[in-house]
Amino acid sequence: MGTVIMHDVVSVDGFIADKNDDVGPLHDWYFNGDTPIRESDQQYDHSGAGNRFKVSRASAEYVRPMWESIGTIVMGRNLFDLVNGWEGQPPAGDHVVVVSHRPKPEGWHPEASYHFVDDVTAAIDRAQELAGERTVAVNAGEVGGQILAAGLVDEVAMDVVPVVFGSGKRYFGSIDGQLLLEHPHVVIQGDGVLHLKFKVRR
């Protein structure tokens, strides 16, 4: 099975959005450079609007291989609803697993490989089955925190942006108790963002 990575862009005080799900300047670095992450693909930002990501060269050299390694994205229903599932075209990978007690909206992009499950363990099982040897990328937040707490995450990847939110939606959700990570094995400074990766200590 491939590696399971919990990933998101985050403020320096640990928030992925404010209480109204507004990401503010967190994603500005995706558009402040001159190097496309994928030159030929139309990408989608957090709002679901079509945009081509152009980042600094340092960020592109980090993000491009990570995105190319992804086979499946795991997301919560809140994010799915916010971005309307990226209109069936995820920013990376070929499949998406949505953790939700509600089914896929009737008639929603039947051609897209989106799978709805109501349990985080079942979500990772399904995501790994779909991804094969490729990476499973778990979006941070409540669902990501639950998957991490269940011991199902191998690495934590954070794109840290120099902004303080003060309150909002936490990167690790409402996780209870301590979990130890190894020292960061990736530290890359981009333009307006610091890319960090930590292995989860077993």
Image: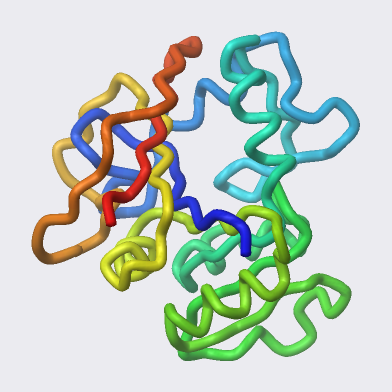
Check the image and report above or below for 45 versus 163.
below
Check the image and report above or below for 52 versus 114.
above
11 relative to 83 in the view: left or right: left
- Which residue does the image show at 72% across and 13% down from the upper left? 35
| Residue at the farthest front position | 202
46 relative to 157 in the view: left or right: right
- Which residue does the image show at 67% across and 50% down from the upper left? 70
Residue 201 location (% of width, % of height)? 27, 50
Check the image and report above or below for 166 versus 71.
above
Residue 143 location (% of width, % of height)? 38, 68
| Residue at the farthest left position | 177
Check the image and report above or below for 72 versus 29.
below
Residue 73 location (% of width, % of height)? 61, 60
Q: Nearer the viewer, residue 17 or 155?
A: 155
Residue 121 quadrant: bottom left
- Which residue does the image show at 65% across and 19% down from the upper left? 61
